[in-house]
Image (spheres, rainbow, N blue to C red):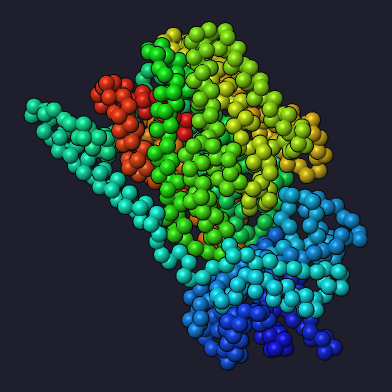
Amino acid sequence: MRKTLLSLLSASAMIFVIKGEIYENTVFPSLPVAVLETNNSLCKRQSETYIQNLENFTMWAHEMWDATAKSAAGVLRGSIFQMGHFEECLTAKAPFLTKYCLALMTANVPSPKVHTDPISLYHDPYEHVSERLYPYKDKSQQPRNIIQVGWCIPASCTPEDSEKFLNSYINDIDLPLLQNNVTYNAHISEITCHTKLENSQFFAADYCFCILTILLGLLVIVSTLCDFNASEEKDEKPAKKSSLYSYLMAFSARKNFNELTKIDESNSALRLLYGIRTLCIFCIILDHRFGTFTSAALLNFDYVETQYRAPLAPFLFHGDLFVDTFFVLGGLLVCYGLLNQFDKRKVNPAFIILMRYIRLTPVYAFVIFYYATLFNYTGSGPLWKLVAGQDSQDCKDHWWINLLYLSNYIKADHVCMAHSWYLPCDFHYFIIAIFVCLLIKKDKKFGLGTLLLLVIVSTLIPFAITLVYQRPALLHFYPDFLTGPKSHYDFLLTYIKSHTRATPYFIGMFAGYVYYKLQGKSTHVCRVRSHFLMLLSLLLILTCIIGGAVFYDPYHKYNALESSVYAALHRPAFAIGTVGIIYVSSYGHATFINRFLCWSPWIPLSKLVYGAYLIHMQFQLRAASKFMNPTQFSYFDVICLSMGDTVLSFLTATGLYLLVEAPFRKIFRQLLMPNRVSPPETKQESRENVSNGVTDSRL
């Protein structure tokens, strides 16, 4: 049987006969045809049927073999996925159910005798190939000693059966690298195996989501038709409307769409925040597209490795700073809005928190519901269950933690939607901000002193954690993070925790207090001071970004104190620079910037940012999970794909706004504040919608 097996392999793999012995001249061994030695009688019988039909050149058998990846290609360039043909395997017309599995093979390479520079990307073309396979401790490089290979086998063969036989098989082949003490082992897990019958039926939760979406759509249609009909009858004496009718009108697409373009005229200095918020989400979508694209199957990961060391690398790999811009805007708008609110009337803090919760949660819950149900049916591929499927399962299991806004502390390694860590942070800061603003109103010096203390403490926390745990200065977007962000140590320790990301928010609150004091005043910053503040702000921002290049340099020796100082100071410095640009653009000589950021199209886009933020990752995860074969990385492709992500995200966000976000905001306002009548399409309505984005700061 072994001779038959190898004769079948020799047609496509690099196998040679030397002095009567069979050798396979590849870095990694090729896969066997099927699982031939197993205690699983059904698996063994179907595998033998497969072999016999393959020898007889039966079409279905050759489809299975054709779908199996043969010898590894591109491994030395960092291409670790050898996928074969996923769909051909699952659709082969075999007399039994077929299964596609990604088998993980690891080459255990001994330490090289001649130690070359383990960090260098250059390798002597005449050195032994095992030098390149050895897994050096440079996390910026993709390990070359592992590959994942597509294997088409009978579905009756369990992952345990397949793994046991594969380990026996690969250690029975005479490979030249065995003479260099290189050994191999294989692993196959259920999550990397697929059959045609998977995701072929809906469950109760899936039907519930479909029914809910249809009902909401019908409500929007009926409400909009009623609204148009009412507008045509405006000359007639208006009849008294019931509460039920007002709830129905909350779903009117005409009214809600018109509100997207409304402008808050209460403080024109804040209008530029529309543009800043929108541009920031564009950058975040681009960064997330880069991350998901490089985490998938690439042919040229060696090119990505060179980009980690490029001079402009921090502008892409330190894009997490754009999230701090949202924290700055959140703190600014919350402080400004709450102080104005407290001037008008006394408000129960618990009621404010409740209003905040019900404004953020309906659309958030709807997107989580989608992730937990239909999202898993939107595609398939070798990596689907591992990436998209796992995220969908996390939403099924831990949706309630997200809705409690505790997902960055509880089960954070299985958080529903990895990018949703921002929301619990923002919610926690909002609660703190309420009490700080109350202190400011009661005793200005004490309140501002408390806020300053919060800035200092929140700056010292990342310093202490980085120093005590001897961690890097920033989260590196290296392969180990890109392929498993939820389980990454630094992601869980410092990146997503509320107590490590708070400084920009509190600095934003100081800015909000300044805007609160300046409202209604004729404030103007002279040209010289404007230019000085703008240059200083840009210098701070560029220093924070470019400074990250030092910590992406693998030759830079780790220094715990240096890393701790950067970890503590780069976010507050970036926040101060952001506030400086906002201030100069509002009150100084920055006419072009102000006009650009106040451009009217930013207004509706800004109000859709929250929905775009929630939904954009599903397009990117889906694309990364559907890769049937490795693809080539290029910046042009990533930029084009991110532009598509942006368009799709904002179109979907528009649907979410009309279907869920705007209607439920109005309904809850009517339920909780029935006596506070605010006529539609007025300045008040407009003001309440100013911050209808990620920060969503107004009550």
Q: Give the quadrant of residue 390.
A: bottom right
Q: For this rendering, which residue is in front, 367 or 25?
A: 367
Q: Position of residue 520 (x, y in %)?
A: 41, 10
Position above or below: 559 against 297 = above
Q: For this rendering, which residue is in front, 11 or 97?
A: 97
- Residue that extends furthest to the bottom in the rendered view of this protein: 56
Decide if residue 582 is in sight here. Answer: no
Q: Position of residue 655 (x, y in %)?
A: 35, 44
Position above or below: 5 against 539 = below
Q: Position of residue 251 (x, y in %)?
A: 27, 38
Q: Is residue 618 left or right of residue 163?
A: left
Decide if residue 397 is in sight here. Answer: yes
Position above or below: 65 against 640 = below
**Residue for point 32% across, 42% down:** 659
**Residue for point 59% across, 69% down:** 101
Q: Quadrant of the N terminus?
A: bottom right
Q: Position of residue 320 (x, y in %)?
A: 60, 37
Q: Give the quadrant of residue 36.
A: bottom right
**Residue for point 61% across, 46% down:** 413
Q: Is residue 353 left or right of residue 75?
A: left
- Residue that extends furthest to the right in the rendered view of this protein: 113
Q: Is residue 667 left or right of residue 485?
A: left
Q: Quadrant of the C terminus?
A: top left
Position above or below: 296 against 550 = below
